Amino acid sequence: DPRFALVHRNLGWAYRHREQDLRKAIASYEAAQAADPRDARIVVELDELHELAGTPLETRLASLRRDQAALRARSDGLAREVLVLSGLGRFDESLDLLEHNHFHAEELSGAIHDAFVDAHLLRGLQRLSERNVAGARADFEAAGTYPDNLEVGRPLRDPRVPQVAYYAALARDAAGDSAAARRLLEHAAGLPHTEGWPETRAYQAMALARLGRGAEAAAIFDTVVRAGEAAVAGATEAGALSRPGTAAREASARRLLGLGLLGQGDRSGARRELARAVALNGADLWARQHLESLERSP
């Protein structure tokens, strides 16, 4: 019976995990979704495949919203919609879902809080570019919170703190509160035990540069570049190229390398790596943000 959705879903699961064939997996999951559009598990797993395959975000959103009531009954379904909306730059809609729904920890990982942080920071940067300093400050400050409805607790070592504090400092500086901006930059730069988080270190180096501590910033940017180069090499080695999700991993690696090169003052190198990251994964929010910022600046 071709209307038996579970068979199509199981075939898709096997094509992905056994044969690592995303094209066949997506075709089977689409057949499963057509047979039973109300099964949100099928929709969620299909979107994960689309993400790995680099499917355009507009196509993913249409697939997710084929039956919104069923999708939004699951935390992981809501989370997929949040990610796609943020990828499309529709941060108001993304944050509306994040703020007015309850997400269950047993159905998700801590990644839902990262989506919350990203949406607030990126909307804050939009507002800052529009000279809406108060709105930007509100978004940056919200990004540092852990709302109860997300069911994610604040970790003892939070890798997003330097990034949040750095952008909050930009808003304070734009408002003319240089003392508060300096305190936030010092907080960003002073977080200890960040050696294993090269992207976190990049934001610490940005904070140090704004504090006038150029030599310390340069030393960190050197380590970020080396980490980025190693990550690119790992993502592009022969064995990695055959695994699903290679493009997203390489995009993340090139984003890191681009950040490091930008910190070293190599704007052309940074532009090259960030553009490659965006070409590999159009849903990489921060690769797009840094590339657009670089293109806007003289």
Image (cartoon, grey):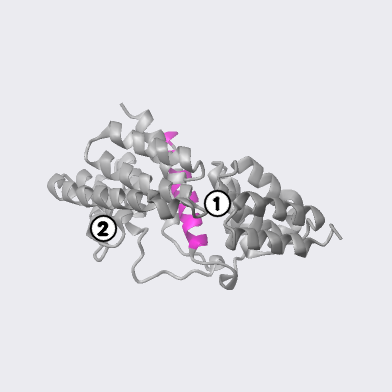
Q: Quadrant of residue 214?
A: top left
Q: Is residue 40 left or right of residue 181?
A: right
Percent across and percent down for residue 43 are 69, 56
User: Which disc is residue 187 wearing?
Assistant: 2
In this view of the protein, which residue sits in the foreground, 34 or 264? 34
In this view of the protein, which residue sits in the foreground, 86 or 52? 52
Q: Which residues are magenta?
A: 111-131
The answer to if 125 sits in the magenta stretch is: yes
The answer to if 252 sits in the magenta stretch is: no
Mark 2 and mark 1 in contact? Answer it, CB < 8 Å.
Answer: no
In this orientation, does residue 207 appear?
Answer: no
**Residue 288 drawn above or below residue 99:** above
Percent across and percent down for residue 46 are 65, 55
Give the distance between the C-alpha atoms of the residues marked 2 and 1, in whole angstroms: 36 Å
Q: Is residue 88 left or right of residue 176?
A: right
x 16%, y 50%: residue: 219
Q: Secondary structure at mark 2?
A: helix
Q: Secondary structure at mark 1?
A: helix
Which residue, given by chain and number where applicable, does mark 1 sit on? 52
